[in-house]
Image (tube, helix red, strand yellow):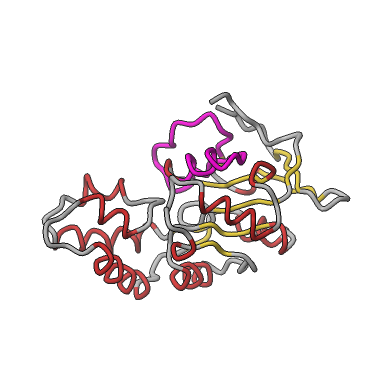
């Protein structure tokens, strides 16, 4: 893909992934999944990088473990994650940025179940959107574009006119395939994903403008390289 900058353009709506994009739950998530991996004889060091941005049931199913029911294991993981909220915190600048958005112009689009998503957003102290697309809402999770297409539809817009904020490769592909523009959030990644899209570590690097017709535009607060 060619390099893309969202600056100098306007969008109908913003669609945000949750974990790693507007909040960090990496400590809690990796605690839960590490314990699960060890119980199943899997090396957490090599396994943990594969779990982010993908629904739990699909991660377990991909492993094809003998005698393991992916749906049952996903429920076990869900209950463990619901009980572990320690260390969940907002990405830098996310609170002010999300608070400045009109409620009908943004949504969370996450691979997490709805109950877990709302609990984590609350634990991070972030605004709760009116529109959330969660794991239960789609037949195919990321990298399928279905979730972002549904998020745009629920807001009443075409995904081609939306801007997706993502951190994980599966979600970036989902946003691209949906036809949306993409901004990559690298705050929780020691090694940023290779991407041609604009990458940010903090929402403080973005200035939001709400146009007279309600559309959303961004300008950089400091110079940001693209690609």
Q: Is residue 39 above or below residue 140?
A: below
Q: Would you place residue 154 above or below residue 64 in this image?
A: below
- The answer to whether residue 8 is left or right of residue 62 is right
Q: Residue furthest front?
A: 139
Closest to the observer, 136 or 226: 136
For residue 139, side relative to residue 77 (left or right) = right
Quarter of the figure with residue 55: bottom left
Q: Nearer the viewer, residue 44 or 149?
A: 149
Q: Residue at x 64, y 60 (%)?
A: 154
Q: Residue at x 40, y 65 (%)?
A: 87
Q: Residue at x 56, y 33 (%)?
A: 197
Residue shown at 88% from the left, 50% from the top: 212
Q: Position of residue 134 (x, y in %)?
A: 49, 63
Where does the magenta region start and end?
171-199
Check the image and name the residue furthest to the top: 2
Rendering coords of residue 142 (x, y %) = 44, 49
**Percent of width and height locating residue 217:** 75, 44
């Amino acid at each position: 893909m060619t390099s893309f900058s969202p600056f100098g353009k306007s969008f109908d709506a913003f669609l945000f992934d949750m974990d790693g994009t507007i909040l960090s739950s990496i400590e809690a998530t990796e605690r839960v999944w590490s314990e699960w991996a060890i119980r199943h004889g899997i090396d957490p060091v090599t396994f943990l990088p594969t779990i982010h941005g993908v629904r739990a049931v699909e991660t377990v199913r991909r492993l094809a473990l003998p005698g393991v029911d992916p749906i049952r294991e996903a429920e076990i993981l869900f209950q463990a994650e619901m009980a572990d909220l320690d260390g969940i915190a907002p990405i830098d600048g996310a609170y002010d940025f999300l608070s400045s958005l009109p409620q009908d112009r943004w949504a969370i689009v996450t691979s997490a179940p709805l109950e877990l998503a709302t609990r984590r957003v609350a634990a991070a102290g972030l605004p709760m959107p009116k529109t959330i697309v969660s794991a239960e809402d789609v037949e195919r999770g990321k990298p399928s574009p279905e979730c972002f297409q549904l998020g745009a539809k629920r807001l009443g817009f075409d995904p081609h006119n939306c801007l997706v904020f993502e951190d994980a490769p599966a979600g970036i592909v989902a946003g691209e395939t949906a036809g949306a523009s993409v901004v990559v959030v690298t705050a929780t990644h020691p090694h940023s994903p290779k991407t041609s899209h604009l990458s940010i570590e903090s929402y403080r690097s973005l200035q939001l403008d709400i146009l007279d017709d309600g559309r959303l535009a961004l300008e950089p607060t400091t110079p940001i390289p693209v690609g």
